[in-house]
Image (spheres, helix red, strand yellow):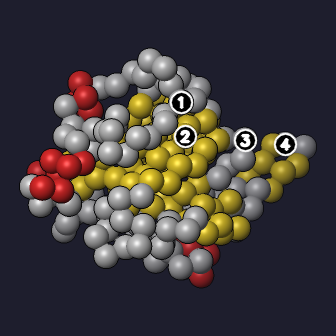
């Protein structure tokens, strides 16, 4: 397992060993001992799988403490541009954005510590798999508007497909001024 530091404390790209032969390939998606050795010590409580058609933007979602979730994300089939925003007030990368293409050819993964907003845009039809350190807790759910001018995220999509729920997410300045971040 290869661990690539991102410059954001705790946020790492993971490239698992991929065993190929004439039948196909095999890889371990997660293994607690290997993750712990890499400094990833989260116990995962919920697994999720979504399918998104090309140009779908999902996010930027997070759960407020004490239900904040660490996530371990990957693409089973397809490709996404994964986007995270650091919402940890004590972090040197507070309110900074990190983006990484995850794709099923590379088989890379991203570990996202609790305290980040998370979203992605599907670069092609994609199956997206993620493990969460805490179960979903509706009353703690929140998010930042995908096209917030303060973040100026270039999603690379001219006409994104966005859920009505995500269209109604507040801008970052509203969340900061209300103390929700």
| First reached walking from the N terminus: tag 4 or tag 3 | 4
The residue tagged 4 is: 23
Quarter of the view holding residue 68? bottom left
Question: Residue at 25% across / 28% down in the picture?
Answer: 167
| First reached walking from the N terminus: tag 2 or tag 3 | 2
- What secondary structure is found at the residue carrying circle 4? loop
**Vertically, is 74 above or below 32?**
above
Q: CA distance from mark 1 to mark 4?
A: 36 Å
4 or 2: mark nearer the eye: 2
Residue farthest to the right?
22
Q: Position of residue 132 (x, y in %)?
A: 38, 58
3 or 1: mark nearer the eye: 1
Question: Residue at 35% across / 59% down in the picture?
Answer: 95
Determine which of the numbered discs, if any, sits on residue 156 in the image: 1
| First reached walking from the N terminus: tag 2 or tag 1 | 2
- What secondary structure is found at the residue carrying circle 3? loop
The one nearer the camera, 96 or 106, is 96
4 or 3: mark nearer the eye: 3
Question: Residue at 74% across / 62% down in the picture?
Answer: 17
Asked if one can make out residue 131 in the rendered structure from this viewpoint, the answer is no
Q: Are marks 1 and 4 in contact (CB under 8 Å)?
A: no
- What secondary structure is found at the residue carrying circle 1? loop
Q: Position of residue 34 (x, y in %)?
A: 61, 75
**Vertically, is 41 above or below 67?**
below
2 or 1: mark nearer the eye: 1
The residue tagged 2 is: 81
Q: CA distance from mark 2 to mark 1?
A: 9 Å
Residue neighbourhood size for the residue with mark 1, other residues' Cα within 10 Å, grouped as few (<14), some (14–19), many (≥20): few
Q: CA distance from mark 3 to mark 1?
A: 20 Å
Q: Are marks 2 and 1 in contact (CB under 8 Å)?
A: yes
Q: Are marks 4 and 3 in contact (CB under 8 Å)?
A: no
């Amino acid at each position: 397992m290869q661990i690539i530091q991102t410059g954001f404390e705790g946020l790492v790209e993971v490239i698992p060993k991929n065993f190929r032969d004439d039948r196909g390939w095999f890889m371990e998606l997660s293994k607690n001992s290997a993750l712990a050795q890499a400094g990833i010590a989260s116990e995962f409580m919920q697994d999720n799988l979504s399918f998104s058609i090309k140009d779908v933007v999902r996010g930027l979602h997070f759960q407020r403490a004490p239900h904040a979730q660490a996530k371990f994300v990957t693409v089973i089939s397809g490709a996404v541009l994964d986007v995270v925003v650091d919402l940890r007030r004590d972090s040197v990368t507070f309110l900074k954005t990190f983006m990484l293409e995850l794709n099923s050819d590379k088989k890379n993964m991203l570990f996202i510590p609790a305290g980040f907003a998370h979203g992605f845009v599907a670069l092609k039809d994609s199956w997206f798999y993620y493990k969460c350190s805490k179960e979903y807790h509706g009353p703690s759910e929140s998010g930042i508007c995908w096209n917030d001018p303060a973040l100026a995220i270039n999603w690379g999509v001219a006409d994104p497909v966005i859920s009505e729920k995500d269209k109604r997410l507040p801008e970052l300045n509203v969340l900061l001024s209300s103390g929700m971040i």
